[in-house]
Every structure is written in structure tokens, then in C-alpha cells.
Image (spheres, rainbow, N blue to C red):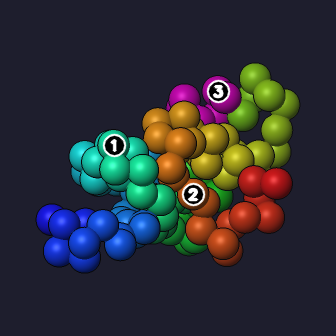
């Protein structure tokens, strides 16, 4: 709807999305369909919870183990997962150093 109201000038959407908060999956899929950037808010389940992300989500820990990565790597795995879901997902700038 916003895309239409703005006459096609909408370029990105920011919404909460993380392994613990998946209810924005429809928005992510819609952004992919419209080729709009999706900027996940709290992609690591909030900075206070980021360290325990792998503990709470076994698939993330397993991917980190398989790639031999550290806790920082868990953040990379989380961002890689978002990109695998939709190529329009972008890590927030505050976490970009963890994805390079």
C-alpha cells in the first residue's frame, strides 16, 4: 500500500525480524516481490540477547559449528540466513562489520 501511495518511490522497509521474531516474513517476501530493500530491525534478537542467539536457536549454532566460526560468526550466520530467505535483506549498518 505504501509503495502505491508513494507512486513507486518507496525503496526500503524496516521491520523487526530475527530467528525469535519471524512474523515479518510476509513483509520480507513482499519486499522481495517488489524488489525493495528490507532492513531487519533487531536481526540478532536485540544486542542484549545476541550472545545467546546460538544457544536458543540450534540451527544457527550448528551452522556456526560447521563453518568453524566464533560468536561473531554466529552473527554472520544469522545475516546469511536472512539473505538466503530474501536477497533484498540487508544487515543494519551497526552490524555490517560482522558480515564483511
Report if the CB atoms under discs 1 and 3 are less than 8 Å apart: no
| Residue 32 locus on image (x, y percent) | 39, 45
The residue at the point 61 percent across, 48 percent down is: 79
Asked if residue 22 can be seen in this view, the reply is no
| Residue 53 locus on image (x, y percent) | 56, 50
Left or right: where 48 falls relative to 71: left
The residue at the point 67 percent across, 29 percent down is: 63
Residues drawn in magenta: 55-63
Disc 1 secondary structure class: helix
Asked if residue 59 can be seen in this view, the reply is yes
When the figure is inspected, residue 60 is found, relative to residue 79, above or below; the finding is above
Query: Is 58 a magenta residue?
Result: yes
Earlier-in-chain disc, 1 versus 3: 1
When the figure is inspected, residue 84 is found, relative to residue 92, above or below; the finding is above
Assess disc 1: are there few (<14), some (14-19) or many (≥20) residues with their C-alpha within 10 Å of its C-alpha.
few
Specify the quadrant of the image occupied by residue 74: top right
Is the stretch drawn in magenta largely helix, strand or loop? helix
In this rendered view, identify the residue nearer to me: 81 or 48. Answer: 81
**How far apart are the alpha carbons under marks 1 and 3?**
30 Å
Which residue is the site of mark 3? 62
In this rendered view, identify the residue nearer to me: 13 or 41. Answer: 13
Left or right: where 65 falls relative to 17: right
Give the label on residue 33, or none: 1
In this rendered view, identify the residue nearer to me: 10 or 18. Answer: 10
**How far apart are the alpha carbons under marks 2 and 3?**
23 Å
State which mark lies toward you, 1 or 2.
Answer: 1
| Residue 42 locus on image (x, y percent) | 48, 66
> In the rendered image, which quarter contains the N terminus?
bottom left
State which mark lies toward you, 1 or 3.
Answer: 1
Which residue is the site of mark 2? 90
Earlier-in-chain disc, 1 versus 2: 1
Which residue ends up furthest to the front in the rendered image? Answer: 7
Amino acid at each position: 500500500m505504501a509503495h502505491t501511495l508513494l507512486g513507486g518511490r518507496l525503496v526500503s522497509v524496516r521491520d523487526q525480524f530475527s530467528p525469535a521474531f519471524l512474523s515479518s516474513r510476509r513483509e520480507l517476501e513482499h519486499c522481495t516481490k517488489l524488489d525493495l530493500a528490507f532492513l531487519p530491525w533487531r536481526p540478532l534478537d536485540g544486542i542484549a540477547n545476541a550472545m545467546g542467539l546460538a544457544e536458543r536457536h540450534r540451527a544457527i549454532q550448528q551452522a556456526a559449528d560447521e563453518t568453524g566460526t566464533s560468536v561473531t560468526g554466529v552473527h554472520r550466520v544469522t545475516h546469511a540466513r536472512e539473505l538466503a530467505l530474501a536477497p533484498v535483506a540487508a544487515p543494519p549498518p551497526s552490524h555490517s562489520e560482522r558480515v564483511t
